[in-house]
Image (tube, grey):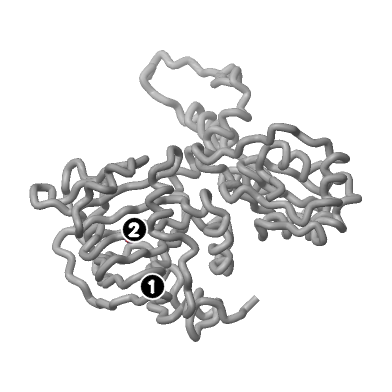
Amino acid sequence: MNRVTRLGNLTTRTFLNRHWQKSPRLIRKAFPKLISPISADELAGLACEPGVESRLVIKIRRQPGWLVRHGPFTVQEFRTLPEKHWTLLVHDTDKQLPELADFLTHFQFIPNWRIDDLMISYAPDGGSVGPHVDAYDVFLLQVQGRRRWSISRKPQAPAIKPGLELKQVRAFKPQHTWILEPGDMLYLPPGVAHHGVAVGNCMTFSIGFRAPTDAEMLADLSNLLLMRLDKEARYTDANLAPADTDPGLITKQARATIRQRMRGAQHLSSGKLDEWFGRFITEPKSWLVPNPPRRSLTPAALRTQFATRKELARDPAVRMAWYDDGAQQIKMFVNGCCHPLPMRLSEFARMLCSQRLYSSHQLGSWMPDRDAIRLLAELYNAGMLYFP
Ligand code: SIN
Ligand code: CO
């Protein structure tokens, strides 16, 4: 779909062609009448909960100039903060509050599996995390108050500050500076140095993306390859020629055998490789696994429940993705597991993977399908789907 979204006068296609992964873009009034789905107090409350990743970054006089504290915090810790020059950052807020997960649907012109999280920051006047570079694309949406953003596209030398977990840059010289008002949004591709400073109290949403490194993917893929490997298969040389004149030599023939064995050990068909990626990319964050319901339901019992319920919801921390494998099967991935489905369920898979709320009207037409209801029951019993 090529419709105008929250990108000002740009269509999603133009934005992706011109800016995505390429160049920064400031979008004034991207969300013209934005009312924050969360207050500063609610955000502080989230940062006090166990299982929620949060940080306080406080500017201090003594070296290294910054203090980083990790949550969960206590109300007392918030009470004793200085008046100015600190920032509270709360990660994965979309996994905690369904309203925030639903807010991310504004960014669905980028595949869901590329979205990492909605990180929310709150800062009083002067609050900042310092000039830094991120490895990921980010939309910085001003939600409350004002923030001055400065950016530089020049390569930056990283600041070496032992003990400080911030990827700050040294001698940051801004090339552009803007003050963002509520509803304004700044897109930054990876590698652009940026520095945001609160102008009065302010709240900023960072919609951050994920792009696994080749090293991460290879490490995961190696586990799969190792699992598939015959553990007893080993080097053989039944046709060995006498080595007596040169016993230290690794012969041409031995090298060829090793190359052949190792290439063979790495071989995966395209289908298996695609399936590995589906499982890998939908793997949930380890601390965000769903809780199964107290009472599990059979597919038949779940079908009966639908008759009286308005909708079914997906736990916002559950990751789903799908594709048609081109060989008459749908591959649907949920939290690192592959669920092969018959082709007739392609629209069902599309719906499950692109929405978080499923009305009983939408689900109704799939109820008679044995494979569809069986999958819904399995996901319900794992706590991944629930009746809100
Ligand atoms: C902030 O919101 O203060 C920092 C967000 C970022 O720079 O990624
Ligand atoms: Co950043």
Is the CB of the residue bearing disc 1 within 8 angstroms of ligand 1? no
Choose mark 2 or mark 1, whichever is in front.
1
Amino acid type of the residue tagged 1 in the rendering: Leu
Q: Is residue 179 above or below residue 55?
A: below
* Pointer 2 local density, CA inside 10 Å: few below 14, some 14–19, many at least 20: some
Residue 292 makes an appearance in the image: yes
**Callouts 2 and 1 close, C-beta under 8 Å:** no
- Is residue 221 found left or right of 347 in the rendered image? left
Q: In this figure, which residue is indicated by the disc labeled 2?
A: 134
Dot 1 corresponds to which residue?
186
Query: Can you tell which quarter of the image residue 154 is in?
Result: bottom left
Residue farthest bottom in this picture: 9
In what element is the residue under mark 1? strand
Secondary structure of the residue carrying tag 2 is: loop
Residue at horizontal 33 percent and vertical 41 percent from the top: 74
Residue, x 85% and y 54% (percent of image)?
Answer: 366
The amino acid at mark 2 is Asp
Q: CA distance from mark 2 to mark 1?
A: 14 Å
Where is residue 5 drawn, in percent x and y?
Answer: 55, 77
